Image (tube, rainbow, N blue to C red):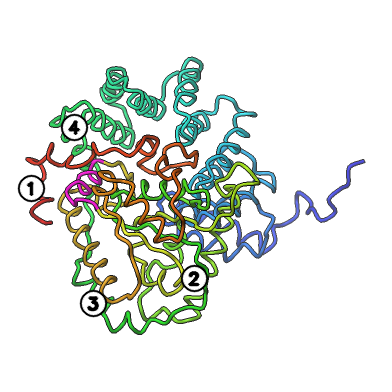
Amino acid sequence: MPRQNRSRRPIDAAPTPAQIKIHQIKTRVAPLLLAGQHELAASLLEEVLPLDRRDPMLHKMLGGAYLGVQNTPKAILHLRRAAELGLEEPETLLSLASAYKETGDIRGSLRVVERVLNTMPEDARAVRFKAFLLRTLGESEKALDWIDAMREKMGAHPETTILRAQLLVRFKRFDEAERELTGLLDDESLLENHRRDALFDLGTLYDKTQRYDEAFDAIDRANRMLPETEVITPDQFRERWTPEAIAAIPTGTETADRPVFVVGMPRSGTTLTEQIIAAHPNAATVGESPWMNNLCRGLLPEHLSSDRLDEIAATYLRETDTLLQRLGGNRKSKKAPPTLRVVDKMPENYYFLPMIARSLPGAAIIHCTRDPRDTGLSCFFQNFGTRLGWTRRLKTIAQQIGLYHAAMEIWREHLGVEILESNYESLTGDPRPRVEAMLHHVGLPFDEACMAHHRNKATVQTASVDQVRNPIYTSSQQRWKHYEKYLGPLIEEI
């Protein structure tokens, strides 16, 4: 006979004070999660979690809250626990798959999605998610075949239509892609987020087919569907990070030299730089790790004690090592050479260079630069969703570029660490000497594999997912000239 759970309360038993409190918090947190108030939701849920650590819904809600604040390791912890406690419905599993995706574990994410499809083969969200993951893995043909097969069974959906159009563009089937996107945009009932995504992709298609006026119009319309945001001024940044404050920051005790931080403006060649180094037999990548942001966001010089810096280093190394192991070290063979350098290519880590330099003094830093007109245009054309609000207007893009230049000038003058500059135009125009310098900077010998980075099977899930599947090319240089008549607010501010 199956063993009975003797601790189970009778069905008609009155709820305990702990159960009442948990119910009250759940009721309060549900609208907070819907409203995007994830930090408050997480703090409230953490308060009551000790009252019942076997409540699967508590873990599920915590997982969702931590996903919202981009603390993906904690999100994974709680979502896995929710599933272990019996909450294996699609919503929980797909949230877990999203968390794996955010850490770069695309194959782990795909395994979870397949679990959903095994029991619910026509779950629309899982179908769309699988297509996206296949594309991210570089399996574009499989992704397109999957979408087409499922459309026959389930009909079209805006998200799969948009992804199908992206894949058609990838295969240069431009006419088909345009029909998909314009047909979608003709639907007056189309949700705003889907309309915005479709406009971005239509603008990209027009750009690739040299219909530049139509391209700019589509992208501008998409960006104006979201509100403008403010950017702090360089003077405000300098007030926080004075030379005296930087000089007073101590150096931590960590001696690790594996980390390689690739920083710069988004769309400045950070993914290309990452993939070149990661193609080396002794290197690997953790992609855009969220950890420096999680650990350093909001910190000012006065917060950076020796103990705090050592805590940053220990947590960063532990968590990125865990991620690297889950990714299999980006290696297929157990006999592969040892991983001596691990690349972290979160561009916006340039904000945190004082914390990086002082907590991990052995780390290598590579700063990617590019013509700011091309960088700014590329940011404007890129669909960052609700992230990076400054990319939605040319003026705020220019302001962000000014802030970035001010920050890098401060770090170069006062941080006292070696930062290698990797210029996109130089790298794409004459790659070999730049690749040699890059590898020398991170302490690796030159290897021809780095000149054929596009053959590396490492997963890429940034905006450059298609570009890095190709050899180094120069066609993105001076792209801004096609749009010069529209770029007055960008060029004047720069």
Is 440 covered by the magenta stretch?
no
Element type at mark 4? helix
Q: Amino acid at mark 4?
A: Ala
Is residue 362 shown above or below 120?
A: below
Read off the residue under disc 1.
Answer: 488
Distance, label 1 to label 3, CA atoms, is 30 Å
Q: CA–CA distance between discs 1 and 4? A: 17 Å
Instruction: Give how far apart the Cα atoms at labels 3 and 2 are.
Output: 24 Å
Looking at the rendered structure, the kind of residue marked 3 is: Glu
Left or right position of 50 against 275: right
In this rendering, the answer to whether 160 lies above or below 433 is above
What amino acid type should be assigned to the residue bearing mark 1?
Answer: Gly
Q: Mark 2–mark 4 contact, CB under 8 Å?
A: no
Q: Is label 2 in a helix, a strand or a loop?
A: helix
Q: Position of residue 146 (x, y in %)?
A: 50, 22
Classify 10 Å Cα crowding around label 3: few (below 14), some (14-19), many (20 and above). few
Crowd tier of the residue under label 1, counting other residues whose Cα lies within 10 Å: few below 14, some 14–19, many 20 or above? few
Reading the image, the residue beneath label 4 is 215
Q: Which residues are magenta?
A: 370-381
Position of residue 85 measured from the top left corner of the image (x, y, whole percent): 69, 48
Looking at the rendered structure, the number of numbered marks drawn on it comes to 4
Pointer 1 with pointer 3, Cβ within 8 A? no
Q: Which residue is mark 3?
A: 239
If you read the primary sequence from the N terminus, does the residue marked by circle 3 or circle 2 appear first?
3
Answer yes or no: do the residues labelled 1 and 4 have beta carbons within 8 Å?
Answer: no
Disc with the residue nearer the chain's start (2 vs 4): 4
Front residue of 227/319: it is: 319
What residue is disc 2 on?
Answer: 312
